[in-house]
Amino acid sequence: MEHILIHEMIEDHNERMLNLRKYYPFFQLMNTNFTTYKEGRYEVLDMAYLTMAVIRYFIHENNFNDQDVSYEEYATFLSSVLQRDFSLLLEIEEERELIRYIFEKLFHDGKPFEFTYFDPKDKKRKLARVKLFESDVKEGRILYHLTKEAVEFYLYTKEMKEESKISVQQLLLEKMIRTNNFKGGIEVVRRMNNEVKKISYEKRDVVKLLSEDIFEGVKAYDAYVENVAGWFAQEQKLFKKNQELVKKALEKAELKEETSYDADKYQQALNDISALEVELKKTIYRHSELMRESVELTASIDGMIKAAKLRKLRPVFDFKKAEAMAKKEDTPSVFGELLSPFWLPNKQKKFSFDLLSEGLSFKPKEEKKREKIVKVVDTENYVFEDELEEERISNNFEKLLGELFRQLMKKDKITLREYNAILEIKFGKEIYQNGDYYSFLVHLSQKKEYHVDKLLLASETFLEGMVSGMMKQKMGKEYKGLKFTLHFLEEEIALHGAFKVTDMIFERI
């Protein structure tokens, strides 16, 4: 017994820690304290709830709608959460900054969450890394999707009530296939098979109840259709998707046979994929049979209800039996309800032909012409497109120039390449798709030397004129006395697509 105990402690510890890592990012994010952000204006926010809400949204988009999520879609969703659940009604720029801050926390600035643990088997500390989100560039856009660990974490905390258990298991199966965890996928398919059996037993109970009590059976049938059968089409779609993934995995494994460096490992992987394919085919067949039986039940339910109603009807009314029941229950008032139709007055109605003649000769009155009211549009507060354009450029220039000033206050020298890396972390790589970024560099390059104090007094270039008013209000005191020069280098920096910019050095003097 002691040998088994020690064996489990030592041999299984590494695997247990790797299984626990999917929970680590959540508890790290829970430590995010909004009381120290922006002087505690958003301390009502709960990072744990926001994390679960965003993961649930990504599961819906990634797996049920089969599409990745852009930053704009994430921002729209989170804005609705902040307004609905926390009653936060913020200015546009303030809300954008808060949403960006939460995004950086959730995505951990694009880096994995890391923690170290001791492995008693190898007798050394190891590093475990896990991400909740991944990103890809598709058609010039940055799109995001969940990792396998994030899906497992969410599904293991609590099952989703609004989706079928089969669909939920298939989400996990998809992630396991994509990460080549075929052995784990076999266990997931077997759990799906058990769910199909449970649904089959539930359908059998509905059919049995329909034969015994048609009215209670109909209620059970409606609940069955709403909670189970309604998800058949979605489940079949996910089955087909996972079957294609298994097929591709098998083809990929067969192509790698010649270059495989470990024959035993290759054969084991091939066996796992084949076993997964067989189990999945069994489940799909049983699920298809269940769908067919449910459709047949739906087609025959109307006939069963009609037959039951006919059995309930009687050709005559037995007054003697009604009298006996009234005496037994001591309720003679029921006879009043039975005889009341015979005591009603004669309501036979006749139609007068004079009314027909009057109806044929009726002439409607001429319709009065209505006065058309023209709504006068007040253009006093109308904002023109060029004003919106100028406001956008001013805001973007303010952020770019402010970030440059902050870096120069920290260190004496910074290159454009380093500056770009900082902008990527703060605003994302989509900044290279924004024309204002390149316009800013062009305007900034018009002068070789800048003095903030002089900029606050007078402006010589378009850039200085646009941001001088802004600097007087926000940046004047913080960056007072700042002077820096621009030096161009020969090296070029490749950015989004075919865009290139010349590297330069910003040096404080």
Image (cartoon, rainbow, N blue to C red):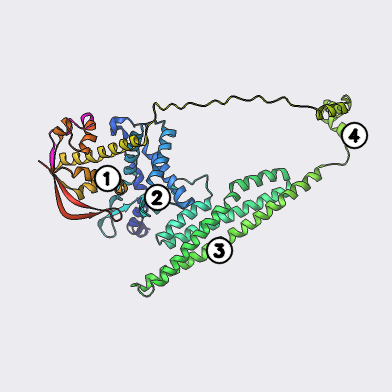
- What's the residue type where badge 4 is placed? Lys
The image quadrant that residue 219 belongs to is: top right
Q: Is mark 2 on a helix, strand or loop?
A: helix
Placement of the C terminus among the 4 image quadrants: top left
In magenta stretch: residue 473: yes
Q: Distance between the residues labelled 3 and 2?
A: 28 Å
Q: Mark 4 points at which residue?
A: 320
The answer to whether residue 36 is left or right of residue 318 is left
- What's the residue type where badge 1 is placed? Tyr
Q: Name the residue under label 1.
A: 437
Residue 102 shows in the view: yes
Q: What element carries label 3?
A: helix
Q: Mark 2 points at which residue?
A: 150
Q: In this rendering, which labeled residue sits more in front, label 4 or label 1?
A: 1
Q: Name the residue under label 3.
A: 282
Q: In this rendering, which labeled residue sits more in front, label 2 or label 1?
A: 1
Residue count near mark 4 (Cα–Cα under 10 Å), binned few <14, some 14–19, many ≥20? few
Task: Please state which of residues 246 and 398 is positioned toward the viewer in this rendering.
Answer: 398
Do tag 4 and tag 1 residues touch (Cβ < 8 Å)?
A: no
The answer to whether residue 456 is left or right of residue 45 is left
Q: Is mark 4 on a helix, strand or loop?
A: helix
Task: Please state which of residues 324 and 73 is positioned toward the viewer in this rendering.
Answer: 73
User: Residue 486 appears at what percent x and percent y?
Assistant: 14, 45
Q: Which of marks 4 and 1 is nearer the N terminus?
A: 4
Specify start and end residues of the magenta stretch as a single range: 471-484
Q: Name the residue at 70% across, 25% down.
A: 366
